[in-house]
Image (tube, rainbow, N blue to C red):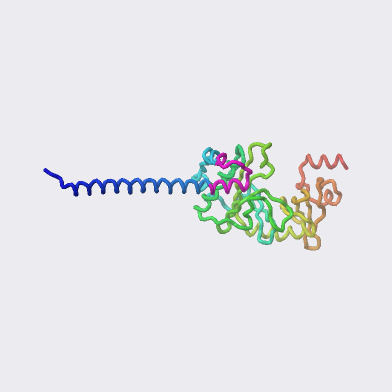
Amino acid sequence: MKLNKKGFSDVITMTIIGGVLGALFITGAFVLQEIDKQNTLNNLYNQLSRAVKVDDKDEVKEEVARYTYNLDEDSLVFNLNSLTENDKESLFFWLRDDNKFIALRGKALYNQKFNDVEEVIIAVRSFKDFFEKQGFDINQVNNNPYGIVEGVKYITDPSIGFEKDNLKCLLYWNTSNFVDTIENPPLSLRCGYYTKESEEEFNTFYPVVAGEREFARITVEKIIGDFAKGSTSGWRGGSNWYASKQGGEWAVDEVTQDLGCLFDNIADNYPREFFTEKEWGFCDKIK
């Protein structure tokens, strides 16, 4: 059978054109894939470089490839669902809209030490993705990844606050470990409910204890009858406070870094349960 020369030439031409188009399609797909990959690496580089000084982008690529973090989401979901307002094992501080810290009680759901800062950053991103999937919002007042809160002298640990209705979760890491000479920076997660009890406790004792003092955080540790004690912390350090009801109103008796039983007005009037027998023995010996 004879082939028409013109028809044969047309077949060859179409084959060549098809090959060229196919090659262009494959090349284009490959180029787009590489661009997407490069964009992803650039985004990761930008995020990492905000917290870590890295001079070489290739170094960042190696770090990103090396660090992966598999969050145990099933366990975390179980612990979140099991949390109730009666869980008060662990204490953490939640920044209110008025730039005052309120003490919340709940549970420590996660504590882990990492090899270095980059690993912490990868883990933080995993937690952010997890809480987003669980329907939590980032509380912008408590979104302080650099540990600096505008209007508050007290520098906090870097942290991110997540919330879902009254359930609050604070993910935080220790800023003092973010230097090359200190190993194993920690990452912690504490969750608890913002309850009416915690609100009343804050409204009762914060203005009484803080007053004009520059305390950032107030905790209430014990209330027995008309007597209460707790602790404070702020940019100048921490102290213990002791308060009693006077004329039906709470008033501060002492704010001190010493044991309260060293003061006669506390030793003579406060319930003995406010101090351990060892503390009483120490105070009696000193006095």
Residue 19 x, y percent position in the rendering: 30, 45
Q: Count of labels shown?
A: 0
Q: Is residue 45 magenta?
A: yes
Q: Is residue 254 magenta?
A: no
Task: Say left or right for 72 vs 200.
Answer: left
Classified by dominant secondary structure, the portion drawn in magenta counts as helix
Q: Within the image, what quadrant is residue 143 found in?
A: bottom right
Residue 82 x, y percent position in the rendering: 53, 49
Task: Say left or right for 134 vs 176.
Answer: left
Q: Identify which residue is drawn at 76% across, 42% down.
A: 276
**Residue nearer the viewer, 270 or 96:** 96
Q: Identify which residue is drawn at 16% across, 47% down.
A: 4
Q: Identify which residue is drawn at 65% across, 58% down.
A: 197
Q: Which residues are magenta?
A: 42-60
Task: Say left or right for 222 vs 84.
Answer: right
Residue 241 x, y percent position in the rendering: 78, 52
Is 137 situated above or below 187? below
Task: Say left or right for 278 vs 42.
Answer: right
The quadrant in which the N terminus is found is: top left
The quadrant in which the C terminus is found is: top right
**Residue nearer the viewer, 11 or 174:** 11
**Residue nearer the viewer, 15 or 54:** 15
